Image (cartoon, grey):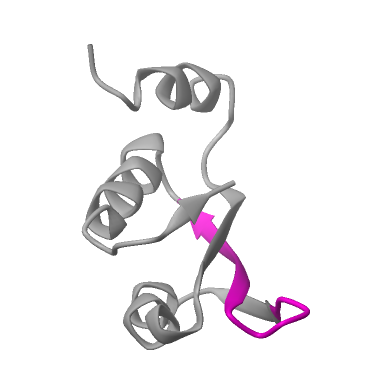
Amino acid sequence: MDKYEGLRKKLAEQKFPCKYMFKFITLEENLAELKPYFEDAEVKTKPSSKGKYISLTAVIMALSADEIIDRYKSLSHIKGLISL
């Protein structure tokens, strides 16, 4: 079973194109690696109170469910990245 199957089912209810919000928590040191994946997005970041972690919210105009899932897959190599 594909680990993205649940997400794919939820996205099947959407009409595309649509705005889609990605939310992540990661170590501050990973931010530079994460940002290039969202050059086409409206991005907001917020550091944790102690500054070790940072949250990133990125809104894109998605054309399909596959585009969203492919983006999650392309980020899966980043250690310590937590999807919300």
- The residue lying furthest to the front in this view is 50
- Residue 54 image position (x, y, % from top left): 60, 76
The image quadrant that residue 52 belongs to is bottom right
* Image position of 70 with respect to 1: above or below: below
- The residue lying furthest to the top in this view is 1
User: In what quadrant of the picture does the N terminus appear?
Assistant: top left
Q: Nearer the viewer, residue 58 or 26?
A: 26
**Residue 61 magenta-highlighted:** yes
55 displayed left or right of 65: right
Residue drawn at 51 percent across, 28 percent down: 11
Q: Nearer the viewer, residue 58 or 80?
A: 80
Marker count (numbered): 0
Q: Nearer the viewer, residue 75 or 43?
A: 75
Residue drawn at 43 percent across, 48 percent down: 63
75 displayed left or right of 58: left
Residue drawn at 38 percent across, 88 percent down: 32
The image quadrant that residue 75 belongs to is bottom left
- Residue 18 image position (x, y, % from top left): 59, 47
- Residue 27 image position (x, y, % from top left): 48, 74
Residues drawn in magenta: 47-62
* Image position of 64 with respect to 54: above or below: above
**Residue 4 magenta-highlighted:** no
- Residue 74 image position (x, y, % from top left): 23, 56
Residue drawn at 48 percent across, 53 percent down: 82
* Image position of 36 with respect to 79: above or below: below
Q: Main secondary structure of the magenta part?
A: strand
